[in-house]
Image (tube, rainbow, N blue to C red):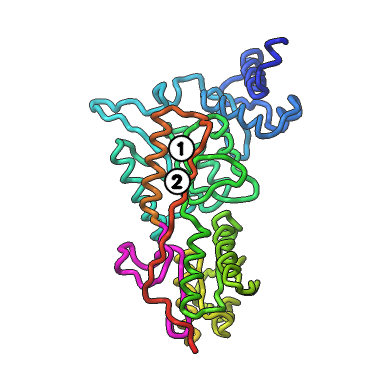
Amino acid sequence: MNTTERVPLYQKIQEYIRDQIDSEGLKTGDRIPTEKELMERFHVSKITVVNALSGLANEKIISRVPGRGSFVSSREPESQLSAGGQFPQRTGTNLQVRIIGLVMPSIVDYFAIRLIEGVQKALDEQGYRSMILLSEGKLDKEKEAIMLLKEVGAEGLLIFPVDEEQYNEEILSMKFAGFPFVLIDRYLPGVETNYIAADGRKGASLAVDYLWELGHREIAICSDSPLQTVTVQERIEGYVNALKNKGALINPANIITDFRVESLKDAQTHPLYRYIRNRMATAYITLNGRLGVQIYQMARQAGLAIPDELSVVSFDDPTSIVEEFSIFTHIRQFESDMGYRAAARLIEIIRSGEGRPANYDKTLIDPELVVRQTTGRVPS
């Protein structure tokens, strides 16, 4: 068999682009063929093209710009990075900055703060610094953040991913190229990666079991996430399975999703407020701490006493960074430990040079029910 026939397709694409750059004298900033053009020319899938372009980007042969395409990179030294992808030593010091990138949707609650604290602790112990970029829950911003962090020399990435039906191609390209990264809090179904998360199904089951013991039978579960993320789906599955195990009928009206609470100033016009006021459920499980606080406040506006007339269990502690001062019954997900273990695992991957491992680590942390002041027995 001819040896050229054994060359992987993504390598053929890379050879073609290198030849284009050399034979046509392309200069820095010149555009190379688009992903669509390459797919048509080589009769391959988008993933194969992304894999090829990612490899060239890692070699600093091309630069990829979200929404614009790929361009010939500068032939100058690689953005002043050393061969190992690290910043060089600073003049006059022995300090060598080693960067780990962290991509988060936002930092608006204690979940995010505690997660970052855990990451920082692990990085400090190993002599790394973090660079944090926010995606705002938008896929294009997540792609941009990943590319920028790689461009400035991050040795690996920790990503709390935006979860949409169409996966971030930058995450896929990192996987194919063997660039070190670990996903936090959620994974991408059907895509093998290293990830660490709390067991959402178990967390929801703990909440249902506890409320059931208190006599609640009309238990609602609420999510204000604009996306039906894996995290949301798993927690709802845990809720449904826990009720089925008790022989209860599932009331679809008690699975409340696809809404937003922008402000409590006009809370009385919100459908969720009317649901609460009319006592459609005696207990609520909220899939994040902020929503737990909003339901607590809506209930008080509706004249309902918590926990005497309504119980609330939230995922995550929304009211205190110090566990002992929380007032909310909540599902504790050990966010600090999650961040620490994710960062420690990423550093292991970087130092071992695993690249594309045969097996990926998939770590689920057991959550814990913490009983505080927002739950009580079902009202008679």
Q: Quadrant of the N terminus?
A: top right
Amino acid type of the residue that numbered disc 1 sits on in the rendered structure = Leu
Q: Is residue 200 depicted above or below 3 in this figure?
A: below
- Give 349 or 159, whichever is nearer the viewer: 349
Q: Position of residue 61 (x, y in %)?
A: 55, 22
Determine whether, in the image, residue 359 is placed left or right of residue 129.
right
Q: How many marks?
A: 2
Q: Amino acid at mark 2?
A: Leu
Looking at the image, the residue that sits furthest to the top is 2
Residue range (magenta)? 305-333
Q: Are marks 2 and 1 in contact (CB under 8 Å)?
A: yes
Residue 7 located within the stretch drawn in magenta: no
Q: Which residue is mark 1?
A: 149
- The x, y position of residue 198, in whole percent, is 46, 54
Q: Nearer the viewer, residue 356 or 264?
A: 356
Label 1: element kind = helix
Question: Residue 159 location in percent, x, y?
Answer: 48, 44
User: Eyeballing the image, is 86 above or below 301?
Assistant: above
Distance (Cα) linking label 2 and label 1: 8 Å
User: Which of the 4 image quarters holds residue 31?
Assistant: top right
Name the residue located 39 percent from the left edge and 52 percent from the top edge: 115
The earlier-in-sequence mark between 2 and 1 is: 2
**Image mark for residue 133:** 2
